[in-house]
Every structure is written in structure tokens, then in C-alpha cells.
Image (cartoon, helix red, strand yellow):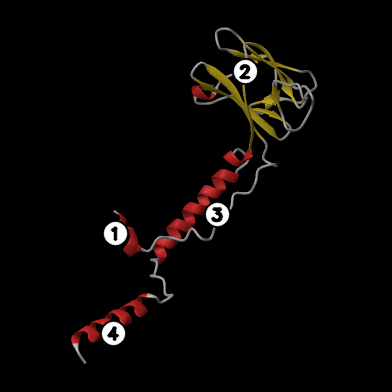
Amino acid sequence: MNRPHLLVVFLSLAALVSCTDRAPEVDPAYRAGIEAAWAEREARLTADDGWLTLTGLYWLDEGPNIVGSADDAAVRLPDGPALVGSLHRGDDGAVTLLPDSGSGLTVNDEAATERILATDTSGSPDLLHSGRILFYLIERGPRIGVRVKDPEVFMRFRREDSEAPIPAELRASLR
């Protein structure tokens, strides 16, 4: 047999061996770390105040902003009374809550009363609840908004099984 034929046979065998279905082994500790990270991420996203519960963001105008489930409310809640109160934004940026009597609105787990509300930039925003609906003020530059969350309407986050861990050999080559 001459050498060119030997080279063809060798290359054919090499190609055949490289076409096996066997995937590289993944370190069990690495796989466990990936699974733990996914579980933690899913728990954060699906928590009662997680990102998947977000149902609305409303930027406040100066003056009164009606809050409730009514179609014409400036801050529309996905459930509950048509009117729970109003948020009055002053020209100084302060937002005053004016709750509607009998609405059941709470602030930081206490019955709501007229008060100036803290935004998220304070480090501890006032948390308002109308039934299961949570909302609070966020401040972004000169704008002040209301972030609304409902733990019952989020779409379940589901990772795809195709997002398998990367084998250690490949991880090392990507560095």
C-alpha cells in the first residue's frame, strides 16, 4: 500500500472517530453549581416581589395622580377598588399619599394615612399594598414613577434544558 492511500485511510478513521455521539464529561460539582445558580435565579424572579410579578410602571405628573383599578386611573392597579387614593407630586418632587377612606390601602403593613412617601433612592421605599397588589415609588433622575407588582399574574420563568453546562475542557479554552 502506498503512502497516499494510507493517509486517506488514516483521515477517514479520524473523521469517523470524531463523529461519535459521546459528549464530554461534565464535572459533577460544576453541574451542581450551575443547577444551584439556576434555582436561585428562578426563586428570585418568581418571588412575590420578583421581576416576573411586575405589571406596570407609571410616571407621575405634577399634581394629583389617581390610583386604582379604574380605567382612567393615572396609576392603574390590576385588581382591587376602582379608587384607592391619589399620589400628589409637588413641584419640589415630594409625593404625598392621599388614601381613599375605606380602600384598605396599607403603607408598610399599617393602615394608610396622608403622608409623604419615601422613594427607592432612600434605600427603604414605602411599600403600599392594596390587597395582594404591591406598589412603591422609584426615582430616576428628575422623574418619579410607581412600580406595580402582582404575585398572582407572573408568567413562570422556565429555563430551557438545552442550556446545559459547558464541559470543563471547553470552559478552559474559552478563558
Q: Nearer the viewer, mark 3 or mark 1?
A: 1
**Which one is earlier in the sequence, the residue at label 3 or at label 4?**
4
> What is the C-alpha distance between the residues marked 2 and 3?
35 Å
In front: 87, or 112? 87
Q: Position of residue 90 (x, y in %)?
A: 60, 9
The circle on residue 12 is none
The circle on residue 173 is 1
Q: Nearer the viewer, mark 3 or mark 4?
A: 4
The circle on residue 60 is 2
Circle 1: is it few (<14), some (14-19), or many (20+) Cα within 10 Å?
A: few
**With 143 as the anchor, is 67 left or right in this view?**
right
Give the secondary structure at mark 4. Answer: helix
Q: Nearer the viewer, mark 2 or mark 4?
A: 4
> What is the C-alpha distance between the residues marked 1 and 2?
51 Å
Give the secondary structure at mark 3. Answer: loop
**Which one is earlier in the sequence, the residue at label 2 or at label 3?**
2
> Is residue 127 something that shows in the picture?
no
> Is residue 99 something that shows in the picture?
yes
Q: Amino acid at mark 1?
A: Ser
**With 168 as the anchor, is 118 left or right in this view?**
right
In front: 127, or 59? 59
Q: Position of residue 119 (x, y in %)?
A: 55, 21
**Which one is earlier in the sequence, the residue at label 4 or at label 1?**
4
Give the secondary structure at mark 2. Answer: loop
Residue at which label 4 appears: 9
Residue at (59% x, 22% y) in the render: 145
**Does the residue at mark 1 contact the one at mark 2 (Cβ under 8 Å)?**
no
Q: Amino acid at mark 2?
A: Leu
Quadrant for the N terminus in the image:
bottom left
